[in-house]
Image (cartoon, rainbow, N blue to C red):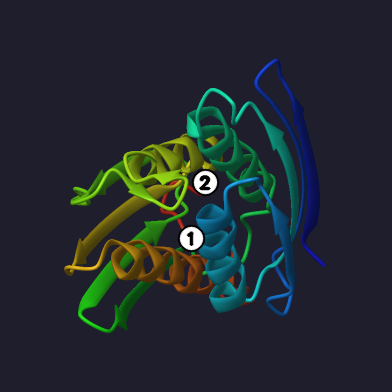
Amino acid sequence: MRAFKVKRDTNETKIQLELNIDGTGKYSITTGIPFFDHVLSSFAKHGSFDLKLDVLGDLEIDDHHTVEDVGIVLGKAFENMEKKNIKRFGWAIIPMDEAKATVSIDIGGRPFVVGNYVPNTERIGSFSTENVVHFFESFSNNAKINLHFEVTGENEHHKVEALFKAFGVAMDMATQIDERKGIVSTKGVI
């Protein structure tokens, strides 16, 4: 079982995360930002990851530190994963009503994010839409994962939710074990 616990305590956030990569999509998520809880739940459910996440953040300031630090902690959990025999690459195209999100992943040890998400609104509930890209940057830098995404649509809720569902499906594919693979790199290391 590939299960990890990560704790992060700063002056801005206190986070406890438990992640089972080989889970069934069970989740218990409390960040203090209801829409962020919702899309992280979609990530866990559609990625079949068991995710327990408890966050106490400085939401009296804004949601930036909480979203950023969740990306950091979730990234660190995936970075701890043994890379031998993983498929390494994953991708997904997920529609949600008028919206469509595409995510491709390379768990290759080189963090990089390329994405086209430009919000049409400043907020979805109490969640700042400018933090979508920042979450993926924080995750990628700490997981050492290359992540590309595209999203189209009109409804901001649909766009972001489709993006997190696609993220879950792509990560599930990339983290799956295939005993034939060994280390999927001509270098011999990831």
Q: Is residue 175 visible?
A: no
**Which of 54 and 90 lies nearest the eye of the viewer?**
54
Q: Secondary structure at mark 2?
A: loop
Image spot of residue 145 (x, y percent) = 45, 47
Q: Position of residue 169 (x, y in %)?
A: 47, 74
Position above or below: 151 against 8: below
Q: Residue at x 53, y 53 (%)?
A: 36
- Residue 190, which numbered label? 2
Q: Nearer the viewer, residue 26 or 30?
A: 30
Residue under label 1, please give it: 184
Q: Nearer the viewer, residue 173 or 161?
A: 161
Circles 1, 2 touching at the beta carbon (< 8 Å) = yes
Q: Quadrant of the N terminus?
A: bottom right
- Relative horizontal placement of residue 56, taking residue 48 as reference (left or right): right
Mark 1 closeness class: few <14, some 14–19, many ≥20 residues within 10 Å:
some
- Amino acid type at image mark 1: Val
Pinpoint residue 60: horizontal percent, then vertical percent.
Answer: 59, 26
Report, in whole angstroms, how far the alpha carbon at label 1 lies from the one at label 2: 8 Å
Q: Quadrant of residue 51?
A: bottom right
Q: Quadrant of residue 22?
A: bottom right
The crowd level at tag 2 (other Cα within 10 Å; few <14, some 14-19, many 20+) is some
**Point 50% across, 63% down: residue:** 39
Q: Secondary structure at mark 1?
A: loop
Q: Is residue 33 visible?
A: yes
Task: Work out whether residue 171 or residue 126 is closer to the camera in this orientation and state it.
Answer: 126
The residue sitting at 50% across, 68% down in the picture is 168
Above/below status of 20 relative to 80 = below
Res 134 label: none
- Residue sitting at the far top: 11
Where residue 158 sits: x, y (%)?
A: 32, 70
Query: Label 2 is placed on what type of residue?
Result: Ile
Horizontally, residue 76 falls left or right of residue 140, namely right
